Amino acid sequence: LLLILVLQILFNLCRLSERNCVEIVAKLIAEKQLDVVHTLDGKEYITPAQIAREIRDELYINGGRINIVDLQHILNVDLTHIESKASDIAKSDSSIQFVLGQLINETYLDQMAEEVNDRLQEAGQVTIAELCKLYDLPADFLTEALSERLGRIINGQMDTYDRGVIFTDAFVAQHKARIRGLFSAITRPTPISSLITQYKFQEHLLYSFLEEFISSGRLNGAVIGGRQDKAVYIPDIYSRTQNNWVDSFFKQNGYLEFDTLCRLGIPDPMNYIKKRYKTASMTTLKAVCVGRTIVDQVEASVEEAIRSGTWVDIQPLLPTSFSEEDASILLQQVMRTMQKHSASRTFGDTIVVSEQFISSCVSLFEQMMQHKAEKEVQNNHAHVLTEEDLKQAAIIAESMICVKKDKREDRKKKALEGAGSIRAGGGGNAREIRTRKTKKKGKRDEDSDEEMSTTSKQKQKEIIFMAQEEIEDILRNRLEDCPEEMICELAEHLMRPLSKSYQEVLHSVFMSTATSAAGANRKKTVKELQEEVSNFHNNIRLFEKGAKLFPDDTHVQLGKHLLKTICTDISNLLFNFLAGDLMMAVETYTTITAELRLKILAKLPEETRGPLSKLHNALSGKNIEEFLTILDGVAEVCGIMLKKGDKKKERQVIFQHRQALLEQVKATEEPALVLHLTSVLLFQLSTHNMLHAPGRCVPQIITFLMTKIPEDQYKLLLKYQGLVVKQLVGQQKKGGQADDDPGECNSIEKESEYDVETVRKELQELTPFVKDLVLKSRKTSLTEE
């Protein structure tokens, strides 16, 4: 490249054009035979070595610190090449450093250190943070650079606790003298943070000098709270006065309050008390610290209350500054120490009540228990049943389920065997019907077993002697000067013991009066019972005879209704009769429930329990014939002979039943009831059979009467039935619209009211005619004619 330059200068004939020179240089650069850098304006080439020399020259010219961005404008070279060379220079020369895009040499740092020293000597201290803002350099770099020049260029020292501060020896001596003088003059507790703010002390220097003065004895005092914002300096003169006051107060009162100690200037009362009274027995509470004197006083009061069988509230025994929480904590610790939990109870956090006193409170209710038990036994013996009765009933139910499962399996086997011989003879059809009934009975047995098992497993409710409010009222009247809180908690505590005692008294009264009560409460003799059971039995047979005239589905519904009503009544009558022997009879047998029947079953002997269990289960079935068969067996067990009714007596019963229904028809004006009674009476008049039907079977009865009564009567009944249905539907709609928006349903309500009123008027007009169908009926039916 130099040769080309020489030829270009010396020989005009051999001179190359500028274009040729550019192409030759580009070729050499491409083949990496020439290492040069193109300038930003594209007019010159410069070598990397030349860039490095010019960077060093510019660094020297600018006093030892220059930014590489400025070098780009000065050298007219791309920033990438300048940054690369600057890094190489910093790596190769230890006296030059590359910091935040700037080259800095030792000359600049020495000059900066001289300037810092001038500021330090003038102000006494400088902070690295201030120098960072002033010289726009990072704190770590400045700290390291200035630390190397301490004692050499900078006449000062760096804080050992805070390396961000540099101060002179004169500043330290001045600080030390000011601190010594200030703290020597303090006579009361003073927060150190306020002194630092007011006098602008260096925090670490202050704590260091304080520790030095206190340990050497130069200052008589102590720093409480360590090197924290809440640290307080307490001089000895104040500490002595403070300690004398605290000792005097504790000696006179036996306790120390934390808030009082804080007001005296003790920032950490708990630790102060622990250090001050290391050997004393102190009990620390929430807001106070208690000495042995008060604890002994509380223990003596509690001991006296337990020994004398009374109660004591420790809150009035304690100073007024004690909160209820402190009193509760103190009482708990005293009770743990005394180990008197078995002889007393704590009510209301601060009241100790002896068990003897609680027992005396229970005795206040003994007479009332006796009177209430006697009254309860007179009213209802069934309440005296215990949980053992329920357990026994549950065992019986489970055993019955097992026995009946075996029976069902046997019946299934027999049914399968019988199915093969259905076509063998004339009895095959009857055999088939019997098999079907047996299956239905088995299903009914399953349902009744499940109901019995579920009922027997229900937990018997606990008998409550008296409500808590009533107990509180009695305690208020009998006990004087008892706090309200104690009365409430004592009443709550007595609820279970009183209920348990009442159950025992109730059982005792029942057992003592059982013999006389059984004779007095049994209202029916065996003869009277026999007559009533026979009447029930004959009525059931007559009703079943009338129900058989209907199709199978209606027959089943009528049978279920009969089982739930009259059959249940006769069962309850027999159960109540046998319960009299167990002293468990009730005044009205119709109030006996399925659960009570199970309880009575649990008390019966084995020979009676089986038939009555079958009778109880038959009530959940559908077959009246099966119920009557079981009823015959139960009557035999009970020693009752059922009288079979003759034709004359049956006609008398049917006549009396019809007269009773006619009286009801005359007395009622309710359309639905009129329709129900009229339909049943027309059925009886047409078929000469009694009918016991629910309201939902009225449509089936009217359908049955279609061929039994004249056509005009049948049409009148149909029309009356339609109006009754409309009236019931209208009433339901009116009740449903009461919950809707009145504005949206206004027109619907008016139409509904109009329809209901129209139907009501029509019903009023037709009711006399419907009643006349039975009140003025002919003595012969359409069939007889």
Image (cartoon, rainbow, N blue to C red):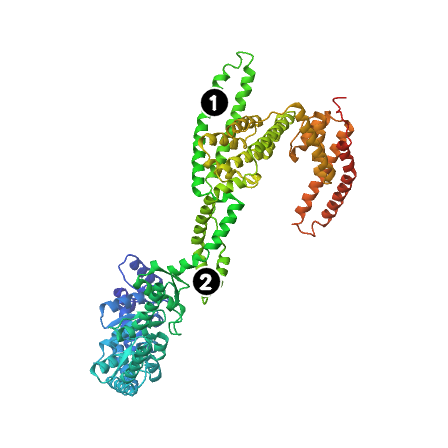
Quadrant assignment, res 262 = bottom left
Q: Secondary structure at mark 2?
A: helix
Q: Earlier in the sequence, mark 2 or mark 1?
A: 1
Q: Which residue is mark 2?
A: 487
Position of residue 171 in the picture relative to residue 395 (left or right) = left
Q: Is residue 512 above or below residue 168?
A: above
Nearest-to-viewer mark from 2 and 1: 2
Residue 90 versus residue 349: which sits nearer the camera?
349
**Amino acid carrying mark 1 in the image:** Lys
| Residue 284 in sight here | yes
Q: Which mark is residue 117?
A: none
Q: Is residue 33 above or below residue 394?
A: below
Q: CA distance from mark 2 to mark 1?
A: 67 Å
**Amino acid carrying mark 2 in the image:** Ile
Q: Which residue is mark 1?
A: 412
Q: Residue 125: give x, y in percent of width and height.
A: 29, 82
Residue 220 versus residue 201: which sits nearer the camera?
220
Q: Secondary structure at mark 1?
A: helix
Quadrant assignment, res 677 = top right
Q: Residues within 10 Å of mark 2 (few under 14, many from 20)?
A: many
